[in-house]
Image: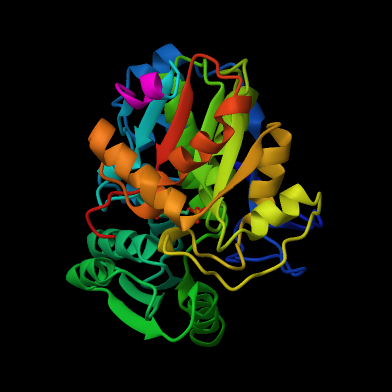
């Protein structure tokens, strides 16, 4: 699909699509704006479903110009598992788990990465830089290896799981340990972009485009009848991406019923929840204090986008403690056989807190964002 321009989500300033920009001049995040006329009425589920069930099934909605640029490992196409035990225990009959731990590097990040690295190849970049709490770096490391591109990855020294660092190094990436949290790592990555001209990757416009496919697949797998999608919020890119995916389907005439989005944050890092609950537009940064490292983003890059998505979908944000996350992870493992990392169990922890008010429809989908094998 053709990109019309890149636009700021806060001040609406527009930029040409060939620009390699990552933030608006006002400091807020950017979104890709398409020309939907191209696909309206031309795509139907029958056509889409004749293709293999994976990320690139929805090719028309993704911003890569030529198929020759696509760097893919058959990411996406993850199972939507119907709950066998927790649905009965908590009386949510249509409870499903979208198990993103089955992606090539163990998290949904691969969906954003296949698009980001394909765009980097399209742009002719040979050196990329990214900041990560672990999974993003591991994913970038794998896909840059495949694309024969050099990757430099900044991670917070004390907050990053050692298995994730080993994974990045295993793929041959250069890993740099930073004192402080993810926000500090991000500053380093941005500085390499600005001073050394490395191609900056991470939770910037093209990643969110890739993460839209979680939304397409959920609607595809639920036959369009989804009442709630519950997902963790770190930088907010996943949740905002899912919502953009839902709206793409709407614009393409492929969905009639909108799901509500529920975001989940850890009580030790809840800047988006605070803005939501106090009806604010802007997000006040915090110093993260949670063991769920994948959602320990104190100054969420796509926080504003996530906030907008939740409001537009008539959704909500739930805040859960680390103890509730640990309990949810155990329930998933011991009652459903799903071994998730702590952040990946956040949607279940969130669900358990809103059971009394949940007006569940045919499908309530929890996005289990990453495997527990490396946490
Ligand atoms: C990155 C990540 C998140 C948070 O996603 P955002 O797009 O930053 O909101 C949640 N869970 C896992 C396992 C992750 O890797």
Is 252 situated left or right of 174 in this image? right
Instruction: Check the image and report above or below for 244 versus 79.
Output: below
Task: Tell me the quarter of the picture where residue 22 sits.
Answer: bottom right
Place of residue 34 in the rendered image (x, y in percent of width and height, measured from the top left): 64, 40
Place of residue 360 in the rendered image (x, y in percent of width and height, measured from the top left): 56, 19
Which residue is painted at 61% across and 22% down in the image?
Answer: 40
Q: Say whether residue 34 is visible.
A: no
Instruction: Check the image and report above or below for 247 versus 170.
Output: above
In which quadrant of this rendering is ligand 1 seen? bottom left
310 vs 21, nearest the viewer:
310
Inspect the magenta stretch and tell me whether residue 72 lies in it: no
96 vs 191, nearest the viewer:
96
Task: Tell me the quarter of the picture where residue 330 sits.
Answer: top left
Task: Tell me the quarter of the picture where residue 253 sits.
Answer: top right
Question: Where the N terminus falls, by quadrant?
Answer: top right
Place of residue 355 in the rendered image (x, y in percent of width and height, measured from the top left): 55, 28
- The magenta span reads 82-89
Instruction: Check the image and report above or below for 39 versus 31.
Output: above
274 vs 62, nearest the viewer:
274
Question: Where the C terminus falls, by quadrant?
Answer: bottom left
Q: Say whether residue 67 is visible.
A: yes
Which residue is painted at 59% across and 26% down in the image?
Answer: 356
């Amino acid at each position: 699909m053709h990109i019309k321009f890149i636009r700021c989500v806060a001040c609406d300033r527009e930029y040409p699509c060939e620009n390699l920009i990552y933030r608006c001049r006002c400091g807020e995040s950017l979104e890709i704006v398409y020309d939907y006329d191209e696909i309206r009425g031309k795509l139907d589920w029958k056509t889409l479903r004749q293709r293999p069930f994976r990320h690139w099934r929805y090719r028309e909605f993704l911003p890569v110009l030529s198929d020759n640029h696509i760097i893919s490992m058959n990411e996406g196409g993850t199972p939507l598992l119907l709950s066998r035990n927790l649905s009965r225990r908590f009386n949510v009959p249509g409870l499903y788990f979208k198990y993103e731990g089955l992606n090539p590097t163990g998290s949904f990040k691969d969906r954003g990465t296949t698009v980001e690295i394909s765009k980097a190849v399209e742009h002719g970049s040979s050196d990329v830089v990214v900041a990560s709490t672990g999974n993003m770096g591991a994913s970038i490391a794998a896909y840059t290896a495949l694309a024969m591109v050099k990757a430099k990855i900044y991670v917070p020294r004390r907050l990053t799981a050692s298995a994730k660092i080993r994974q990045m190094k295993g793929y041959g990436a250069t890993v740099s340990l930073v004192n402080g949290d993810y926000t500090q790592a991000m500053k380093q990555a941005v500085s390499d972009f600005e001073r050394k001209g490395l191609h900056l990757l991470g939770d910037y416009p093209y990643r969110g485009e890739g993460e839209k496919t979680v939304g397409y697949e959920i609607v595809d797998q639920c036959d369009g009848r989804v009442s709630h999608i519950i997902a963790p919020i770190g930088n907010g890119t996943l949740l905002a991406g899912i919502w953009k995916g839902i709206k793409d389907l709407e614009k393409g005439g492929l969905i009639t019923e909108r799901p509500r989005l529920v975001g989940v944050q850890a009580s030790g890092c809840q800047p988006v929840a605070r803005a939501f609950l106090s009806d604010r537009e802007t997000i006040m940064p915090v110093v993260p204090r949670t063991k769920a490292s994948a959602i320990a983003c104190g100054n969420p890059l796509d926080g504003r986008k996530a906030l907008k998505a939740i409001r537009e979908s008539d959704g909500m944000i739930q805040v859960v403690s680390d103890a509730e996350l640990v309990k949810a992870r155990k329930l998933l493992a011991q009652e459903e056989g799903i071994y998730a990392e702590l952040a990946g169990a956040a949607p279940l922890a969130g669900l358990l807190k809103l059971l009394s008010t949940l007006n569940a429809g045919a499908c309530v989908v929890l996005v289990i964002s990453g495997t527990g094998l490396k946490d």
